[in-house]
Structure formats: structure tokens, C-alpha cells
Image (tube, grey):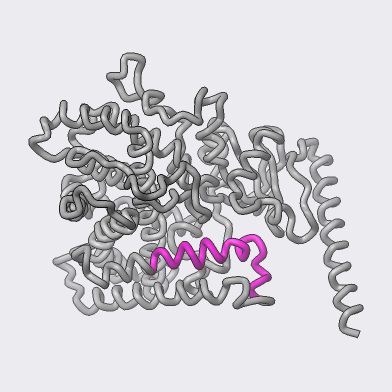
């Protein structure tokens, strides 16, 4: 008896899906709006199986086939893919209805408060906390000489390690860079600083890697097909992802508790202290800063900052080393410019950046060529809207195809070539910003950490190549320019 019943249920679900689709198409015709083109998918799962091992390659193929705006169905979700930089700027800047965020059950730290933090929050909660976050992070160093000094401490630790291994192959360079980036970020948040060989720092970095591997790696299918968590909680990766997030929640809550016990109003040492001061002074029970809700928002925001700020910079720096080994003439040009500005008698500082147009152009070309977050971060339409003659339904996901935007021959001419000069004036003496480059996305939800990320990349890159000529180990297989599968476009392992 069970099999006929299951068959009837499946048939009913598929029939309901088809009816739902037909109604939506009719609604489009009534509105006299064009239906967004896109590939056909299967009932229930949509186009998920068509994405393959490297979804950004598939999205790029579809961009060429369907144009700058097309839609796919990812499970039960409609996703609108934007593959043109001008349209990307327009849709993410002008209308606040396109500034929402999809809700992913797998990323919830608190089941009863599912939309906390900066990444998945929206509306008033997001806007209030974004403004607070920017204001307070500036207080603790963003865009100031104190932040540069903080970064340079970790730059020098990396330089010392490289000096000790000079002339030898160095393995796991990305891990070394991760330690440095995470250490600086953790100091801003908690005023705790580690030596790079401290096992506590190693465990912190390992935990971040687990977030990407188990939540954004193994849990990707759960984002598209969330019902799998109820049917296959272990096999779908849901339980593994939850264990990682619960571990982070316990760790961050413990850190906040320590700060509460040592809190002194007249001595606010770090971001946690500043946030706790805001929570303490808030008496309005409806405020997002009030009491337990405020503390949970703090914990969720801290995790978001780690996820957004640590692996992205480390991955970009890893690609930097790959590209400058692959293209030694680029490495040489950078070193010549560094010497012309510093005389190699002092370290490079952020103040040198305006005098180093080639280094600035090189950073932009690294960001373009690597496009480490190829599909950007999804937005959600909080209301039904018209865009470019198309109907964008409420709750549709909207995401830029950044990889295609950064590799479109109509925009870049020769995107397959690694050529920093594309960001320079004709005489090569002036850095030229290009608005078609959108690695930190654009509009209302542009990454708040862009300046910090650019400072990190600039300071690590210039100070490493001021001191060293870097080459691949001739005894090891030279990595290609391909990418490993994952949430980010990671380079192949190298030494």
C-alpha cells in the first residue's frame, strides 16, 4: 500500500508545481511584461543538476545563450542572473526592494531568531546594524594608521617566516596567509592577539575552513533543496553543518561572556566592548540592541565578519602569488615600481599607494582575473517589481554573474590575458578605476570591508615582493590557472 500512496503524493506535488507555473506565466501576460528567458529545468529541483561541478561555468554559458538577464530555477527558488555591469549597478542600487536577502535555514545560529547578523538580515535590522558596524569599525581602525600598524605586524610575521625558509620550497602558503588575516581581524573584534604558531590561532583558522567546507561546501544542495534536511539529515550534510555552526556559536558566546565579566565603561578595548556598551544602554525592548537579542546579534555579526573577511583576502593573496610566479615580467614591473618609491630602504605603506599606479592596477587585475566569488552574494526581491521590462516576482533571488562580467570580451577586449595595464592610462603613469570591476559587488549591500581587503592585499603583496623574488618550486608540478571546486575560486595547491 505504501508505494501507491507515495506515487500519488509525488504525482500530486508535480501537478501542483505545473499548475503553479502556468498561473505565474498567465500573470506575466496580464501585466504585459516580458517573461525572463532561461533554461528549462525539471519539476521540484529545477536546474540544480545542470549546474555541474563548477556552477559559474554553467552560468557563464547561459549568459552567452540567454543574454544579460535570465532566470534559472534552483529547487523551489527562482534566481534572476544579471550578467551586465550597468544592469548590475542599476538593479542593486536604485530600488530598496532588491536589497533583501534569501533565508537559508542551514546558516541559522539561532532557530528562534533566524535573520540575525549582517549577511542574511534585511530591512531596518540590516540598515541600523550596517551603520553601527561601519561607525564602530572605523573607531577601531578601519581606514586609520592604527589599522595599518595592525596589518603590518602580521605582514612582518609572514616576512620572517619566508626569510627563514629563503631558497627552500614553502608548502601551505595559503594557510600561512590565513593565519595572518584572521589574527588581524580577531584583534579588532576581541583585542586578543596570537603568535602565528599559537595552536589557538590554528584552531580558529581550522574552524573557519570547516564553515566553508561543511556549510557552504557540503551544504550547498541544502540551500537549493532545504527539505533534504528532514529526509536525509546526515547524508545531506545538514548535521555536519549544524555541528560546525554550534561549535562557532559556543566559542563566540564564550568570548562575549568573558568580555561581559571584564567590562568597564571607561575602557572600551575592542568591537565586542563597544557593542556590549550599546546593549547595556538600550532600554527600549523593541530595539535590536536590547538584552539577549542584542547579544545574539553581536555573536551572529562576529561570525559574518569572519566568514566575509578572512578566507576572501587569503584566497586573493594566494592567487596573487600564483599570478606573479606565472607572469615574472609582471613581478619585475612591480618590484621596479616599489624600489622607485621606497628605495628599498623602508617598508611600503598605504601612504605610498597614490605613487604606485602599477601596484594599484595589479590589485584590480588580480581581483578581475580571479573573481574568487564568481556568482556574488544573492539578493532577494522583497516586493514584486518591474526591471528592464521583465517582471521580477517577490522572493526571487537576484545575483550578479561576476565571473562573466569580469571576463566579457565586449567589455575587456582580451579578458583571457592577465594584463594590469588595462587599469592604467595610455602612458602608464596614472591608475584608472574601471566601474565594470565589481569584486565587492555594488549598490546598497556593497561589502563594508572593501577598504580593509584592499589594504591587506596591497600591503602583503608589495612588502613580500619588495623583499623576495618568488618562483614555483622547479621540482614540483607547476599549478595551472584552473580552480578547485568550492564556494570560492581557489587556486590549485602549490609550493
Q: Could you tell me residue 145's position as x and y percent?
A: 17, 45
Residue at 44% from the left image edge and 36% from the top image edge = 368
Vertical order, 32 against 305 (above or below): above
Tell me where residue 211 sits by quadrant.
Answer: bottom left
Tell me where residue 207 sits by quadrant.
Answer: bottom left
**Residue 193 visible in the current orientation:** no
Q: Residue furthest front?
A: 475
Q: Is residue 401 left or right of residue 254?
A: right
Asked if residue 275 lies in the magenta stretch, the reply is no
Q: Is residue 16 left or right of residue 82?
A: right
- Magenta segment, which residues? 207-229
Q: Main secondary structure of the magenta part?
A: helix
Q: Is residue 226 left or right of residue 283?
A: right
Q: Residue furthest left?
A: 345
Q: Nearer the viewer, residue 91 or 53?
A: 53
- Count of labels in the image: 0
Quadrant of the image for the N terminus?
Answer: bottom right
Amino acid at each position: 500500500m505504501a508505494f501507491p500512496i507515495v506515487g500519488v503524493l509525488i504525482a500530486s506535488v508535480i501537478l501542483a508545481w505545473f499548475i503553479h507555473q502556468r498561473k505565474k506565466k498567465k500573470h506575466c501576460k496580464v501585466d504585459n511584461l516580458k517573461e525572463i528567458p532561461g533554461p528549462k529545468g525539471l519539476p521540484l529541483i529545477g536546474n540544480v543538476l545542470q549546474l555541474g561541478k563548477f556552477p559559474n561555468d554553467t552560468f557563464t554559458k547561459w549568459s552567452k545563450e540567454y543574454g544579460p538577464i535570465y532566470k534559472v530555477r534552483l529547487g523551489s527558488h527562482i534566481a534572476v542572473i544579471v550578467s551586465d555591469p550597468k544592469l548590475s549597478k542599476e538593479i542593486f542600487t536604485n530600488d530598496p526592494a532588491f536589497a533583501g536577502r534569501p533565508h537559508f535555514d542551514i546558516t541559522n545560529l539561532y532557530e528562534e531568531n533566524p535573520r540575525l547578523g549582517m549577511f542574511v538580515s534585511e530591512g531596518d535590522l540590516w540598515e541600523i546594524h550596517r551603520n553601527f558596524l561601519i561607525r564602530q569599525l572605523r573607531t577601531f581602525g578601519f581606514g586609520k594608521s592604527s589599522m595599518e600598524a595592525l596589518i603590518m605586524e602580521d605582514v612582518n610575521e609572514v616576512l620572517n617566516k619566508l626569510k627563514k625558509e629563503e631558497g627552500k620550497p614553502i608548502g601551505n602558503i595559503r594557510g600561512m596567509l590565513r593565519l595572518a588575516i584572521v589574527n588581524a581581524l580577531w584583534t579588532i573584534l576581541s583585542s586578543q592577539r596570537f603568535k602565528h604558531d599559537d595552536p589557538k590561532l590554528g584552531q580558529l583558522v581550522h574552524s573557519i575552513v570547516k564553515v566553508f567546507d561543511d556549510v557552504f561546501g557540503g551544504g550547498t544542495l541544502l540551500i537549493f533543496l532545504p527539505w533534504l534536511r528532514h529526509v536525509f539529515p546526515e547524508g545531506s550534510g545538514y548535521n555536519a553543518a549544524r555541528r560546525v555552526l554550534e561549535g562557532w556559536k559556543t566559542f563566540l558566546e564564550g568570548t562575549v561572556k568573558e568580555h561581559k565579566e571584564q567590562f568597564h565603561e571607561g575602557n572600551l578595548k575592542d568591537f565586542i566592548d563597544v557593542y556590549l556598551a550599546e546593549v547595556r544602554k538600550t532600554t527600549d525592548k523593541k530595539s535590536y540592541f536590547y538584552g539577549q537579542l542584542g547579544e545574539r546579534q553581536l555573536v551572529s555579526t562576529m561570525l559574518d565578519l569572519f566568514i566575509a573577511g578572512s578566507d576572501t583576502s587569503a584566497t586573493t593573496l594566494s592567487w596573487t602569488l600564483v599570478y606573479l610566479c606565472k607572469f615574472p615580467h609582471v613581478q619585475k614591473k612591480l618590484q621596479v615600481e616599489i624600489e622607485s618609491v621606497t628605495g628599498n630602504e623602508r617598508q611600503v605603506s598605504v601612504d605610498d599607494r597614490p605613487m604606485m599606479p602599477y601596484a594599484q592596477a595589479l590589485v584590480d587585475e588580480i581581483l578581475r582575473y580571479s573573481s574568487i566569488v564568481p556568482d556574488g552574494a544573492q539578493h532577494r526581491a522583497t516586493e514584486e517589481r518591474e526591471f528592464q521590462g521583465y517582471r521580477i516576482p517577490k522572493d526571487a533571488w537576484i545575483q550578479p554573474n561576476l565571473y562573466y562580467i569580469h571576463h566579457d570580451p565586449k567589455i575587456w577586449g582580451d579578458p583571457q590575458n592577465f594584463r594590469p595595464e588595462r587599469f592604467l592610462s595610455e602612458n602608464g603613469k596614472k591608475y584608472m578605476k574601471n566601474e565594470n570591476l565589481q569584486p565587492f559587488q555594488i549598490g546598497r549591500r556593497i561589502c563594508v570591508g572593501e577598504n580593509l581587503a584592499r589594504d591587506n592585499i596591497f600591503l602583503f603583496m608589495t612588502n613580500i615582493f619588495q623583499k623576495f623574488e618568488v618562483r614555483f618550486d622547479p621540482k614540483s608540478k607547476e599549478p595551472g590557472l584552473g580552480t578547485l571546486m568550492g564556494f570560492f575560486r581557489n587556486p590549485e595547491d602549490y609550493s
